[in-house]
C-alpha cells in the first residue's frame, strides 16, 4: 500500500471524473484520478455542450477556453431531428449549443483538474476495492493499492465500481447499434450533402457531413448489435453499412476515429453504498439522441462535488450527501425518457412516423418547442425543494449586476446570497457562503440564496427563513 492517502479517489478520467476532481479541489481536498488508458482517447463519442453545461463552465471561469475550441450554434428546438420553425427563447444567457469534439472537452477538463492540483495517474486500472468505517482501499492492476476516505466511480457504463458495490442496473438492453466515424473521403462536400439529405428522408439514423477541418463525420446503423461493443468497428464494416444505406461509401479512407454506440437504456437503483459513489455513465446509459450523455455526467459531478466536500470537511448538514441521489436520479430518469422517445421517433416504421408527423405540427407552438428544448439542454431541471417561488429548486441564470455579472461571483464554488435589500447577512456562515448586496441586480425578487451549483434554495427577504435555509444547506453557523 502506498504511503500517501487521499480524501477522494476517482476511478475514471473522462469528463465526469475530471469535472468532479476540479470541484473537489476548489475545496482543498486531496484528489487522485485513476485512469485505465495510458493516453487520452481520440474517439469522438460526444459532439457538443448544451446550455446548462455551458452555464457550469461559465460559473467556474472555463467558458472562454471552451469557446476558443468550438463552434456555437443557435438552439433551434430540435427533438429527434424535428426542428421548430423559429429560434427557441430559453431562460439562459447561453442559448446556444457549442459544437466541440469530446477529445477536446476531455483535454480541457483534464487541464483544469491539473491546474487545481488534482493528481492524475494514467495507465492505472482499478481492479477492485474494499471499504471499512475509516475509508476505502482501492486495488490496482499492478498489484499496488491506494487508501482514501471516499471512492467515486466515474468509470463508464460497464463500471467496475458499480458492479463491485452490487448496485442493480435495470433497464432495456440494446436493440439498435450505430457506427460513428470521422474519416476522409474522395467525394465532394456537395455530393455528400445531396446523398445524405436524400437518405435522411427515410432513415433518420443516418447522417454524414463535413466537420469543418477537411474531414467528414458520419453515423450509420450497424448490421446488428455487437456482442462486445469495446471492439471498435473496422473501416470495411463502416464502408459496407454506408453502401447499404446510401448506395455509396463516399470513398472514405484514413479514419481519425471509429466507434459504436447503442440504444441500451439503464439506470442505477442507487448512487451510493457506504463510502463509495457512482456518477456519469456508471449511473446511467441511454440512446445518444440529443447528445445529452456527456452533459448529464458533467452535471452529476457539479451536483456531487460540493456536497462530498462538505461531508469530508465536517460541516455538511444531515442528509446533504443523500440529496445527490434524490436530485440526480430523477434528472437522469427524465433524460432516459426523452432519449428513448427520440430513439423511437427516428424509426422508419409507420407508427413512430405517425407520431413524428404529429410532433412536427406541435413543435411549431412556442411553448412545446421551449419545453422540449429545456429537456435537451438541461435548463428545465427543477429539484424538488418543496413549495414556494417558481425559482425554488431551479438554477439561477446569469444576471447583470451593478458591477460585472452573477456567474463571475461563483468561481470559487461557494454558496452565494444575492441581496437587493441590503438587510440580510450570512454572518456565521461566511466561511462557506459569500454575500453580495446589490440593489441594481436585475432580479425580480428581494434576495435569493444560491448553492455552490447555482440552484436557488431560498427566495425572499425573511431573515429567519434565510437562516433556516442556511442551516439546511450549509450546516450549523460557525
Image: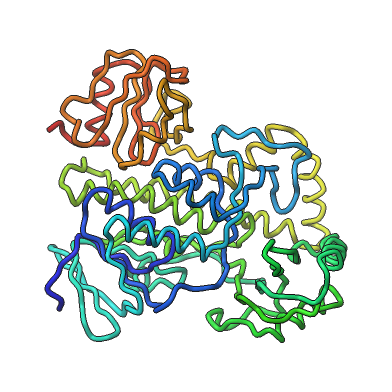
User: Which residue corresponds to the image point at 38% horizontal and 14% vertical from the top-left?
Assistant: 439
What colouring style does the render use? rainbow
Q: Viewer-proximal residue, 257 or 9? A: 257
User: What x and y, as percent, mark residue 288?
Assistant: 61, 61
User: Which residue corresponds to the image point at 82% horizontal and 73% vertical from the top-left?
Assistant: 187
User: What x and y, as percent, mark residue 313?
Assistant: 17, 48
Observer able to see residue 56: yes
Q: Is residue 106 left or right of residue 305?
A: right
Observer able to see residue 275: no
* For residue 232, above or below residue 433: below
Q: Is residue 449 left or right of residue 355?
A: left
Q: Viewer-proximal residue, 305 or 372? A: 305
Q: Is residue 14 left or right of residue 476?
A: right
User: What x and y, as percent, mark residue 62?
Assistant: 43, 48
> Which part of the image, by quadrant, shows the C terminus?
top left
Q: Is residue 177 left or right of residue 161?
A: right
* Number of numbered markers: 0
User: Which residue corresponds to the image point at 80% horizontal and 63% vertical from the top-left?
Assistant: 348
> Which part of the image, by quadrant, shows the N terminus?
bottom left
Q: Quadrant of residue 257?
A: bottom right
User: What x and y, as percent, mark residue 310?
Assistant: 22, 46
* For residue 297, above or below residue 160: above
Q: Quadrant of residue 167?
A: bottom left
Amino acid at each position: 500500500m502506498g504511503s500517501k492517502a487521499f480524501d477522494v479517489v476517482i476511478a475514471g478520467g473522462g469528463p465526469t471524473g475530471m469535472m468532479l476532481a476540479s470541484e473537489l479541489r476548489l475545496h482543498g481536498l486531496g484528489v487522485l484520478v485513476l485512469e485505465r488508458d495510458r493516453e487520452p482517447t481520440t474517439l469522438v463519442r460526444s459532439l457538443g455542450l448544451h446550455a446548462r453545461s455551458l452555464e457550469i463552465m461559465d460559473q467556474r471561469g472555463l467558458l472562454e477556453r471552451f469557446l476558443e475550441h468550438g463552434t456555437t450554434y443557435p438552439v433551434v428546438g430540435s427533438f429527434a431531428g424535428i426542428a421548430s420553425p423559429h429560434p427557441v427563447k430559453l431562460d439562459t444567457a447561453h442559448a446556444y449549443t457549442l459544437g466541440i469534439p469530446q477529445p477536446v472537452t476531455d483535454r480541457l477538463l483534464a487541464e483544469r483538474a491539473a491546474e487545481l492540483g488534482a493528481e492524475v495517474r494514467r495507465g492505472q486500472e482499478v481492479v477492485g476495492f474494499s471499504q471499512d468505517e475509516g475509508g476505502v482501499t482501492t486495488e490496482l492492476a499492478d498489484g499496488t493499492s491506494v487508501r482514501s476516505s471516499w471512492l467515486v466511480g466515474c468509470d463508464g457504463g460497464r463500471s467496475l465500481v458499480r458492479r463491485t458495490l452490487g448496485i442493480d442496473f435495470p433497464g432495456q438492453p440494446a436493440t439498435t447499434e450505430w457506427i460513428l466515424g470521422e474519416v476522409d473521403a474522395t467525394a465532394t462536400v456537395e455530393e455528400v450533402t445531396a446523398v445524405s439529405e436524400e437518405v435522411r428522408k427515410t432513415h433518420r439514423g443516418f447522417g454524414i457531413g463535413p466537420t469543418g477541418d477537411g474531414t467528414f463525420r458520419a453515423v450509420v446503423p450497424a448490421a446488428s448489435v455487437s456482442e462486445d461493443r469495446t471492439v471498435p468497428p473496422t473501416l470495411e464494416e463502416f464502408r459496407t453499412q454506408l453502401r447499404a444505406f446510401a448506395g455509396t461509401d463516399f470513398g472514405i479512407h484514413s479514419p481519425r476515429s471509429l466507434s459504436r454506440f447503442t440504444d441500451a437504456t439503464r439506470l442505477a437503483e442507487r448512487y451510493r453504498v457506504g463510502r463509495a459513489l457512482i456518477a456519469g455513465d456508471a449511473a446511467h446509459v441511454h440512446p445518444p439522441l440529443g447528445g445529452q450523455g456527456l452533459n448529464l455526467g458533467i452535471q452529476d459531478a457539479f451536483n456531487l462535488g460540493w456536497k462530498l466536500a462538505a461531508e469530508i470537511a465536517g460541516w455538511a448538514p444531515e442528509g446533504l450527501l443523500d440529496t445527490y441521489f434524490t436530485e440526480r436520479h430523477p434528472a437522469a430518469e427524465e433524460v432516459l425518457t426523452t432519449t428513448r422517445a427520440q430513439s423511437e421517433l427516428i424509426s422508419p416504421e409507420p407508427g413512430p412516423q405517425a407520431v413524428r408527423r404529429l410532433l412536427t405540427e406541435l413543435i411549431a407552438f412556442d411553448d412545446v418547442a421551449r419545453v422540449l428544448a429545456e429537456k435537451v439542454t438541461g435548463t428545465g431541471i427543477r429539484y424538488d425543494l418543496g413549495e414556494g417561488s417558481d425559482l425554488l429548486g431551479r438554477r439561477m441564470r446569469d444576471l447583470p449586476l451593478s458591477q460585472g455579472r452573477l456567474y463571475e461571483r461563483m468561481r470559487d464554488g461557494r454558496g452565494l446570497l444575492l441581496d437587493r435589500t441590503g438587510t440580510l447577512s450570512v454572518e456565521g456562515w461566511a466561511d462557506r457562503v459569500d454575500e453580495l448586496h446589490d440593489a441594481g441586480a436585475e432580479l425580480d425578487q428581494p434576495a435569493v440564496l444560491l448553492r455552490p451549483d447555482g440552484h436557488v434554495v431560498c427566495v425572499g427577504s425573511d431573515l429567519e427563513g434565510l437562516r433556516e435555509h442556511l442551516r439546511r444547506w450549509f450546516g450549523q453557523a460557525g
